[in-house]
Image (cartoon, rainbow, N blue to C red):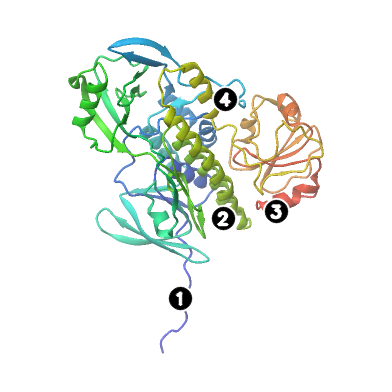
């Protein structure tokens, strides 16, 4: 007699499948893997991106990478940005800074952006992911996906034509501006090109040019820039293009340099990676569809002005990672995942407007000091906040209107704790957990999954004032309260069990 017992449902092979091994996907995968989630990354390319592309790591991104354990490697692989050097008619016209530090910026151990070719950033993140137990396959393209109430089934195709299904509890599309994940979900991108000029970017080797400056040639046809890339013999070329007809090849890149600089085509000894692009601004209508999420360029695209693209993708990942971790490992309510779109879509919209404005302004020497000061004020990403999020609760009866509020990035200031002095707060926060700061008040009983520190003095205590502060794993203040009566409810919302309050 045939066995009519229905087959036992098989558990998902992984907790999270990440599609795309760019900076966003690899950052997210590292964060998930360190939380103990079974994490697998698939990348359509046969290898990680070889070009320099997003070379600017902003202050807030460096803080994230510090927390993930890769900041030292990135420091060793990069450098500060060199001063800009303007050329006219083959003559140097003086040097200037692209970005001047903002004296009013929130305190950070990484006050200035760091220059690292994107291919090296990807290598470092890949090494970290593998150390943490995550897995990565290149030459594997997402073909289709379906989802149920319990999991996502993704069909993937290998470069040799083989196909198989991957089952995951959640899937994240970090597969770029032409996202297959986004198209599979039918999520529209809304935006416009805004008349922005096209551009070419390439990695080149050039004779007769010093590597101590970021070289700029203003030109009516469009400015051209050559930036030395640390750890290599290459320069990154950026040049705006007039008109829509341009094909990027080694020959056209050489001709472009010869036409707009005092260098000859023969001075360009090698042309490596190159790309021609038409910038536009666009924002996905939604960042979540059931068990599938969009992050990075799959969710928002914008011009490269201000070096924001790689960086806000990293911030997407840092926001989503801890929330997936709480739901998968700690049974947090599913509604916690809705806050990802609420918080990051608003942040992305602000960045789209900023990047477009900076791209239009360009990087010329016209009033360079004002340009440098302005970029210093707006590009570091340290001031991004989630004050309007449902995950931000400020229950203090008295607080300064201009002071730190729930939703803000907590200040990375020195403090004195019951265990002794600490040079900066983020040393205490390092790791995947929530942290409760009891500032100049008694600490409530410990809750599972919540580290507690009693802060008794120092600049941090002065900045925060007396009270209890729950710090999310992404360094933002989730709860600010005068007493423990709000604590248990807040912890339950994020999947933590309250202690005796």
Q: CA distance from mark 1 to mark 4?
A: 55 Å
Q: Which residue is mark 4?
A: 109
Marks 3 and 2, Cα distance to the nearest angstrom? 15 Å
Query: Circles 4 and 3: CB distance less than 8 Å?
Result: no
Residue 103 left/right relative to 447: left
Front disc: 3 or 1: 3
Q: Which residue is mark 3?
A: 492
- On the image, the x and y values in percent for residue 243 come to 28, 35
Q: Residues within 10 Å of mark 3 (few under 14, many from 20)?
A: some
Measuring from the top left, give residue 421's x and y in whole percent: 70, 25
Q: Alpha-carbon distance for marks 3 and 1?
A: 36 Å
Residue toward you, 383 or 409: 383
Residue receiving disc 2: 328
Secondary structure under badge 4? loop
Q: CA distance from mark 4 to mark 3?
A: 33 Å
Helix, strand or loop at disc 2? helix
Q: Of the residues under marks 4 and 2, which one precedes in the sequence?
A: 4
Q: Quadrant of residue 92?
A: top left
Q: Tag on residue 7?
A: 1
């Amino acid at each position: 007699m045939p066995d009519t017992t229905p087959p036992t449902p098989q558990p998902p092979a992984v907790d999270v499948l990440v599609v795309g091994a760019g900076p966003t996907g690899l950052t997210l995968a590292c964060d998930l893997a360190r939380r103990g989630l079974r994490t697998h990354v698939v990348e359509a390319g046969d290898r990680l991106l070889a070009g320099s592309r997003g070379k600017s790591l902003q202050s807030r991104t460096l803080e994230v990478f510090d927390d993930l354990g890769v900041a030292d490697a990135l420091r060793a692989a990069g450098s500060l940005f060199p001063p800009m050097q303007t050329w006219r008619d083959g003559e140097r016209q003086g040097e200037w800074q692209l970005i001047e530090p903002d004296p009013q910026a929130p305190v950070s151990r990484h006050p200035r952006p760091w220059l690292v070719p994107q291919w090296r950033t990807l290598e470092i993140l890949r090494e970290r992911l593998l150390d943490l137990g995550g897995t990565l396959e290149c030459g594997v393209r997402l073909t289709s996906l379906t989802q149920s109430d319990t999991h996502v089934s993704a069909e993937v195709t290998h470069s040799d034509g083989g196909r198989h299904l991957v089952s995951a509890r959640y899937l994240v599309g970090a597969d770029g501006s032409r996202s297959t994940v986004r198209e599979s979900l039918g999520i529209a991108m809304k935006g416009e090109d805004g008349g922005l000029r096209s551009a070419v970017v390439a990695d080149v080797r050039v004779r007769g040019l010093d590597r101590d400056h970021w070289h700029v040639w203003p030109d009516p046809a469009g400015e051209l820039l050559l930036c030395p890339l640390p750890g290599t013999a290459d320069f990154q070329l950026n040049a705006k293009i007039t008109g829509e007809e341009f094909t990027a090849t080694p020959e056209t890149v050489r001709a472009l340099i010869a036409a707009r600089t005092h260098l000859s085509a023969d001075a360009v000894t090698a042309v490596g990676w190159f790309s021609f692009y038409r910038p536009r601004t666009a924002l996905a209508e939604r960042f979540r569809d059931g068990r599938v999420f969009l992050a990075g360029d799959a969710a928002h695209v914008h011009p490269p002005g201000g070096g924001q693209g790689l960086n806000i993708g990293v911030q997407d990942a840092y926001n989503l990672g801890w929330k997936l971790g709480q739901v998968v490992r700690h049974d947090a309510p599913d509604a916690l995942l809705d806050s990802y779109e609420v918080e990051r879509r608003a942040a992305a919209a602000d960045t789209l407007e900023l990047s477009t404005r900076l791209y239009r302004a360009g990087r010329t020497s016209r009033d360079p000091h004002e340009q440098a000061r302005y970029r210093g004020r707006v590009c570091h990403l340290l001031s991004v906040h989630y004050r309007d999020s449902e995950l931000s609760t400020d229950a203090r009866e008295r607080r300064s209107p201009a002071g730190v509020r729930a939703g803000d990035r907590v200040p990375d200031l020195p403090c004195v704790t019951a265990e002794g002095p600490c040079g900066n707060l983020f040393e205490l926060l390092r790791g995947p957990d929530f942290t409760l700061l009891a500032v100049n008040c008694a600490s409530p009983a410990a809750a599972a999954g919540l580290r507690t520190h009693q802060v008794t003095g120092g600049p941090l205590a002065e900045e925060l004032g007396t009270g209890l502060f729950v710090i999310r794993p992404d360094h933002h203040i989730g709860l600010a309260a005068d007493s423990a009566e709000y604590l248990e409810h807040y912890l339950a919302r994020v999947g933590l069990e309250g202690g005796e309050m």
